[in-house]
Amino acid sequence: MYILLIKQFFRSKTVWLAFGILMILGVLSISTGKRFLSQKEVAITKTIAQQQKHLETQQRFHKDDIGLLSYYLKFSFINPINPLAGISIGQSDLNSHIQSVGIVALEGQKHNTDLVNPMQQQVGNLDISFLIIFLFPLVVIALNFNLLSDEEEKGTWKMITIQSKSSFRFLLTKFSIRLMFVFLVLGLLFIGAKIVLNIPFSSYFFAIVSMSSLYLLFWFALCFFVILLRKSSNTNAIVLLASWLLLVVFLPVFASNYINNKYPIDEAFTMVIKQRDAYHKKWDTDKKETLERFYKHYPKLRKYGFKTEGFSWLWYFAMQQMGDDDSKTERDALYNKIKQREKLSYKISRFFPPLQLQLSMNEIAKTSLSNHVDFLNATTEFHEAIRLDLYPKIFEEHHPDTIDFEKYKPEFFIPKSNFSWIKNILPMTLITIIIAGFAVFRNLKYFR
């Protein structure tokens, strides 16, 4: 009987149409991920090569003035791209993963990003996460919405209940064939992604596969619940499509609007204005006052005294430092609100599997906004280390030839993982079990 049901299943044009669509879109999504990773890898390679060339060029142009040389020098700090980003691009296509910063005021430099096509930003990326979250559920619905109702409407269900040893087992058999088909396609998709995107076998790759599988099990459980309501095929289709719209489209948009209104980030604009005004106004501020605030920030540099007559690099870089110091409150408030937004998003997502899967994939692939904020904070530390290394050389007027610029290599950010198996797997598992369990329990009287 099982073989016959499999043959009957694959005779359906819907099955082959679904398979064809998923395979074509799967190839496109993998190619999108490959193109994204290749662009980032090329940028990183060029940055590493350009860093050395840049240092040599600036040394030729500014042979005698260490202050002028330091003003023009740029130092690269790189957020490495995880191959898993090819599966879930997240917001990493909007946020720069390379920071080339000078020792002048930092905040204005941190938010420079690449030039991108605005039309592409509006449309978004067809990555694998989009395919799994949005399109796979539609295939699950298309394959299952009339699993029972079609038999009842054709009048064959009564014959099945009479001739079959267990009508419930018969229904589960048909259901399992569809489940295996969808998971076969999902498996092919991940195998292709693993090979093309050069993703190593790791706990993180296994986590994405596990979360995706659990997400599809949730949709199968929901379909199982709806078809056991024993309504018509049309009703089942409407209910399931309405559920898809609610869970995948409306609720994420509603949650996003709620979070944005709860934590507005007006500081993003205020921070930039304060940072720019702070150091521009210092041209007309008493130099001693500027230096006093500078030494308050760097007490160990007080030994360089107060050079208030004429132009000095000590005063100039102190003025630049004030731009960052005056905008620090807004910067901290901005980053804190972004973290609060992410935290609230995770709390809300526990009740909505599509949102939870998207956030989990971005977290695992290191393409979330929270990861970018961590990178920006690390950039601040990197910038501070460069400043502390160069300030004494500038203020003591070392000759550029006496400084080993070879040591200034591009540095790489080491991201931390905040992914929790329990917090991500448990909520979706419980929801799936509750839906499937309730569907079976309320229909035990119909099956033997």
Image (cartoon, rainbow, N blue to C red):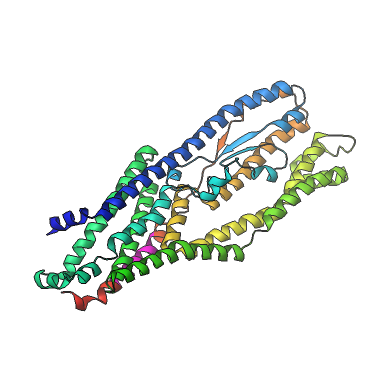
**In magenta stretch: residue 427:** yes
Stretch of the chain drawn in magenta: 425-437
Q: Quadrant of residue 267?
A: bottom right
Residue 432 picture location, percent across and down? 34, 66
Q: Is residue 227 left or right of residue 204?
A: left
Q: Nearer the viewer, residue 303 or 184?
A: 184
Q: Quadrant of residue 431?
A: bottom left
Residue 401 can be seen, yes or no: no
Q: Is residue 61 above or below residue 177?
A: above
Q: Is residue 80 above or below residue 249?
A: above
**In magenta stretch: residue 339:** no
Q: Quadrant of residue 194?
A: top left
Q: Residue at x 21, y 53 (%)?
A: 10
Residue 355 picture location, percent across and down? 45, 60
Q: Nearer the viewer, residue 330 or 149?
A: 149
Q: Residue at x 80, y 38 (%)?
A: 316
Majority secondary structure of the magenta segment?
helix
Residue 341 picture location, percent across and down? 56, 60
List the single residue furthest toward the right. Answer: 309
Q: Is residue 113 above or below residue 225?
A: above
List the single residue furthest toward the bottom. Answer: 445
Q: Residue at x 20, y 79 (%)?
A: 445
Residue 147 picture location, percent across and down? 24, 65
Viewport quadrant of the N terminus: bottom left
Q: Nearer the viewer, residue 179 or 334?
A: 179
Q: Is residue 175 left or right of residue 190?
A: left
Count of numbered circles on the image: 0
Residue 174 can be seen, yes or no: yes
Viewport quadrant of the C terminus: bottom left
